Amino acid sequence: MKRILLKLSGEALSLQGQIINSQRLSSYAVDIAQAHAKGTQIAIVIGAGNIYRGSFGLVSRLSGDYMGMLATMINSMALAEALRSCGVQCELFSALEVEPLAQKPSEQRVEKALQEGNIVFFAGGTGNPYFTTDTAGVLRALEIGADCLLKGTRVAGIYTADPEKDSTATKFTHLTYGECMTEHLNVMDQTAFALAAENLLPICVFDMNTKGNLVRLVQGEQIGTMVTSE
């Protein structure tokens, strides 16, 4: 894979009661740096479920969504710093105005950063409420012409049921966009799947917590669950 969009959940960064666990952060940074060293251009979108999810009390859905978008900036900055400690240059972009922390993305700025060997972060979701970071991940993958969207999770792919709760759940090796939507396989939201399907963007769901999986994927190994048009 020459260019990928890596989608991570915010919860992936939390461990042992910590909102952002330094051990998990370091482990992810090493894996991403190794994949980058293979020559793959990498862009990253991270959710914010470890910091904020949903609304509470008097916070409206609108304000809650903007709070979540700001929280994605925190996670992006943390992983970018961990990657820099591995010797990898990173550039942060945000759909929200948060200068001097990040620039607003443009086709020219993002392409220049990728061509110069930087790992690119897209924070702030789509910049609009009512859209998830899954949808933002698909949108950014399409904008940069990614070969595939890789969704890193803590399980080995897409299953018939939650494998952490149901020992009889079986893993799919391949699914179509339509099957994911009609079977309501809750790996990504329906809007994200529909946008990927319309633009024929391949999606691979894999276990990010298994060391070396990301490198294996960018080198062409078949792991996880692949979602395509047929």
Image (cartoon, rainbow, N blue to C red):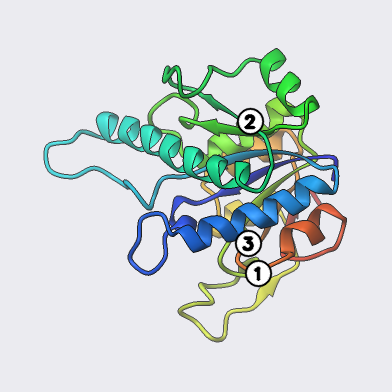
Mark 1 and mark 3 residues within 8 Å of each other at the beta carbon: yes
User: Which residue matches tag 1?
Assistant: 210
State if disc 2 and disc 3 touch (CB < 8 Å): no
Q: Nearer the viewer, mark 1 or mark 2?
A: 1
Q: Amino acid at mark 2?
A: Arg
Q: Earlier in the sequence, mark 3 or mark 2?
A: 2
Q: Is residue 41 above or below residue 222?
A: above
As shown in the figure, which amino acid type bears the numbered disc 1? Thr
Q: Tell me the residue that label 3 is attached to.
A: 208
Q: Residues within 10 Å of mark 3 (few under 14, many from 20)?
A: many
Q: Quadrant of residue 14?
A: bottom left
**Residue closer to the observer: 123 or 34:** 34
How dense is the environment of label 2, judged by Cα within 10 Å: few (below 14), some, or many (20 and up)? many
In the picture, measured across the screen, residue 63 lies left or right of residue 48, that is: left
Mark-to-mark CA distance, 1 and 3: 6 Å
Q: Which residue is mark 2?
A: 140
Q: Earlier in the sequence, mark 1 or mark 2?
A: 2
**Where is residue 39 shown, x and y percent of the image?**
85, 42
Front residue of 22 and 161? 22
Where is residue 166 drawn, in percent x and y?
49, 82
Local secondary structure at mark 2: helix
